[in-house]
Image: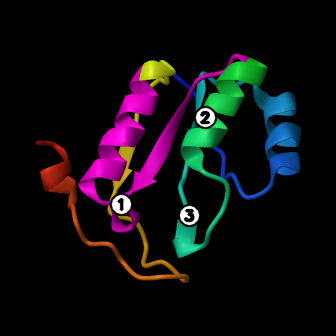
């Protein structure tokens, strides 16, 4: 059985505090991107930071509401090149800032 912790990356100081005290108890972290439609720290950047600084694995979430196909492919390339554990694709909540991109849905992202 694996133990997973959902870490919401809103402030670096919170990330440091939580990961420093919990990294020995969890197999990996999942990192939501803009939960509730509110901006936070990039889940991709946070995932790379956790791997580099703490040597822990994580799966960043990606909100398809915020991306076009080119941006999604760039993110997928970053996940591959930095050897992250995976990528979780979600439609996401409506953003509180800006508008929905609506270029690619969950089904189209598989192709």
Tag 2's secondary structure? helix
Judge whether residue 5 can be spotted in this image.
no
Q: Nearer the viewer, mark 1 or mark 2?
A: 1
How far apart in space, not on screen, are marks 2 and 3 (Cα)?
14 Å
User: What residue is rendered at 69% in x and 29% in y?
Assistant: 50
| Mark 3 burial class by Cα count in 10 Å: few <14, some 14-19, many 20+ | many
Q: Which residue is mark 3?
A: 34
Q: Position of residue 37 (x, y in %)?
A: 52, 73
**Position of 96 relative to 101 (above/below):** below
The disc placed on residue 4 is none
Identify the element where label 3 is drawn: loop
Picture disc at residue 67: 1
User: What is the span of residues highlighted in magenta in the rendered image?
Assistant: 55-80
Q: Is residue 69 left or right of residue 50?
A: left
The percent coordinates of residue 38 (x first, y second) are 60, 73
Q: Earlier in the sequence, mark 1 or mark 2?
A: 2
Instruction: Measure how far apart labels 3 and 1 are at the Cα level.
Output: 13 Å
Q: Dot 1 surroundings within 10 Å: few (below 14), some, or many (20 or more)? A: some
Image position of 38 with respect to 1: above or below: below
Along the horizontal axis of the image, is 17 left or right of 98?
right
Secondary structure under badge 1? Answer: loop
């Amino acid at each position: 059985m694996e133990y997973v912790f959902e870490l919401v990356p809103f402030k670096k100081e919170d990330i440091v505090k939580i990961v420093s005290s919990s990294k020995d108890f969890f197999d990996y972290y999942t990192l939501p991107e803009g939960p509730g439609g509110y901006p936070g720290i990039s889940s991709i950047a946070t995932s790379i930071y956790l791997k580099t600084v703490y040597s822990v694995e994580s799966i960043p979430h990606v909100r398809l509401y915020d991306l076009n196909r080119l941006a999604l492919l760039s993110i997928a390339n970053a996940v591959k090149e930095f050897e992250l554990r995976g990528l979780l694709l979600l439609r996401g909540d409506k953003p509180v800032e800006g508008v929905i991109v609506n270029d690619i849905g969950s089904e189209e992202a598989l192709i």
